[in-house]
Amino acid sequence: MKLGVIAALRQELAPTFGSIPTTPRLVDGLRFHEAPSLVFVASGVGARLAAAAALLTADTFRPDALLSVGFCGALTDELETADLVLGGTPSHPAEPGLLARARSAARQPRLGTVLTVPQVVVLAARKTELAARTGALVIDMEADAVALAAKARGLGFLAVKVVIDTPAAPLASTYSGCWTVAKDLLRGSLVGMIHDSRRVKLAAERLKDFFVALSGSLGAAGGTTTAGPSAGPTSAS
């Protein structure tokens, strides 16, 4: 089995790259990282970039399934920073076999629905409303786009998300741009941003632990190692 792994940010995958040997490969301006049974890419933030990267992954590397991975915000205070959540989206459930394999590789995962939203949500009241209306456990900005790409290519889908913030402990900023961050700093959010940085590191380490275990599981099962015939121009720089 070969899995395509789409994250938004490289920092979500950096500890994983330090623990799983990968080969960098440039395809249509995106830097992919290939391991025997996994191919990783950081698409950039948001649904449009995630969808484009997911389709490129599917068409170039011919994986059996696509994973939307990365950081998320909890909609309930029953979750804590670095909790791992496995599941699908409200309109695209996780592929059962893939979910079962991920559960066996994960350490105490939580199962739940990932709701994709257009922007970072920090207000507890808004999170409570989203949870009540949708039944979702966490929110992100890319999972549903990756799920749609997987469906378009006839592939399995799974969301693998790690909590960084909760309703009771929101992010210090929406981090939606340099100007937003500068304004939040002027409002005295520096200490909160330092705390956010620590939470991000914990979450990225949790993803690394998951992928190390999953990679071992896939290797033991004899995953495929070659890309499909439609692979485009590449560079190993």
Image (tube, grey):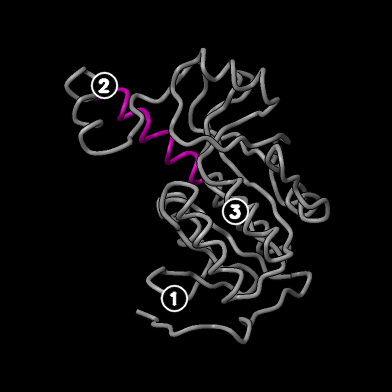
Horizontal and vertical percent for residue 87? Answer: 71, 42
Disc marking residue 146: 3
Q: Residue at x 72, y 68 (%)?
A: 64
- Is 203 one of the magenta-colored residues? yes
Q: Residue at x 32, y 23 (%)?
A: 192
Disc marking residue 93: none
Where does label 2 land, which residue? 189
Q: Residue at x 61, y 20 (%)?
A: 76
Q: Residue at x 53, y 64 (%)?
A: 40
Quadrant of the drawing holding the N terminus: bottom right
Question: Upstream in the sequence, badge 2 or badge 1?
Answer: 1
* Number of residues whose C-alpha sits closer than 10 Å to that of mark 3, classed few (under 14), some (14–19) or many (20 or more): many
Question: Upstream in the sequence, badge 2 or badge 3?
Answer: 3
Q: Does 185 sit above or below residue 213? A: above
- Magenta stretch bounds: 190-205
- The kind of residue tagged 3 is Val
Question: Upstream in the sequence, badge 1 or badge 3?
Answer: 1
Q: Nearer the viewer, residue 93 or 195?
A: 93
Mark 2 or 1: in front is 1
> Magenta residues: mostly which secondary structure?
helix
